[in-house]
Image: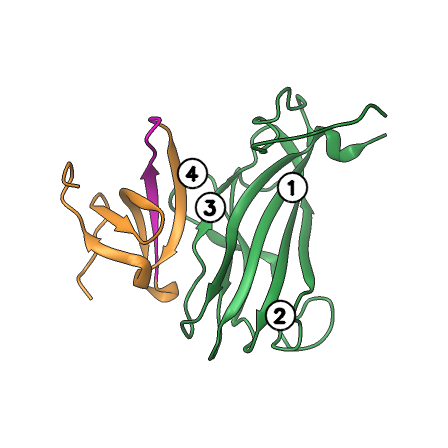
Amino acid sequence: MPEIKIGETVEVAGRGKGVVTDVIPDEKKVRVRLQNEDGTETPIAAPLSAVKGAAKAGKD
Amino acid sequence: MLPLSDAKFVVVTVPVNNAVDSTAFTTNEIDTVGYDYVTIVTQLGATDGPLTVFRVQESDVSGSGFATITGLDASGTTGDGRLPQATDDNLLFRFRFPMLGRKRFLDANITSGDVTTGTLLGCIAILQRAKTSPDTTAEAGFAGSLTLPA
């Protein structure tokens, strides 16, 4: 599994893209601030297995 | 008195089947600003394995720094404070606590155990004792609402 870093843009399966705000290795989770289409943000916690890996910002 | 009329509902986990061993459910963070009491309700569906983590965490800031709240960390296999078990299909579990002395942001940490078909569950938070009552359906956390007069 690729290393995920804070500040990186990732895609969470079923939820969309967002910026990683925390990585919690003990819980095998990351915290991601999802960027919604209406400009709002949704902070979530997701398992590493749901993170599709680093997604380049601005790339579909 | 209709206490839930002044409540805000927050989706924590959409109903989903987690069929991967020892994997956390994806959860939405809960911003409790403006509310002084929280109830987190988890509804189990069919499950063939116990949860291994079932607890509430808090942080002063959104997105990081979460730590488990003492007393809101389920353990064991029996009693009210147990981890949901494989035999707890279709039952409800709750955490409830005042926000006095608590940090603003909450999260439910829910992790599946050893499963074959999976664990189906959904989770919501009900925020009560509002400083200012929600004025609209959306502010109360709903996409739709129908009401008859009391």
Closest to the observer, B47 or B75:
B47
Callout 4 amino acid? Val
Image mark for residue B140:
none
Q: Does residue B77 appear to the left or right of A17 in the view shown?
A: right
Q: CA distance from mark 4 to mark 1?
A: 20 Å
Task: Looking at the image, tell me whether mark 4 or mark 1 is earlier in sequence order.
Answer: 4
> Residues under labels 4 and 3: Cα distance?
14 Å
* Distance of label 2 from label 4 (alpha carbons): 29 Å
Asked if marks 4 and 3 touch (Cβ < 8 Å), the reply is no
Q: Which residue is mark 3?
A: B28
Disc 1 vs disc 2: Cβ atoms closer than 8 Å?
no
Same chain check for tags 4 and 1: yes
Chain ID for orange: A
- Write down the residue under mark 2: B84
The answer to whether marks 2 and 4 sit on the same chain is yes
Instruction: Specify the quadrant of the image occupied by residue B3.
Output: top right
Dot 3 falls on a residue whose secondary structure is strand
Q: Depth-wise, is mark 2 or mark 4 nearer the camera?
A: 2
Tell me which chain the residue with mark 4 is part of: B
**Residue B25's spot in the image, x, y percent?**
45, 60
- Tell me the subunit letter for badge 2: B
Which of the two discs, 3 and 2, labels the residue nearer the N terminus? Answer: 3
Q: Which residue has dot 4 on it?
A: B61
As helix, strand or loop, the secondary structure at mark 2 comes to loop
Residue type at tag 3:
Asn
Mark 3 vs mark 1: same chain? yes
Residues under labels 1 and 2: Cα distance? 20 Å
Viewer-proximal residue, A27 or B144?
B144
Where residue A43 appears, x then y in whole percent? Answer: 40, 41
Check disc 1 and report the residue beneath it: B126
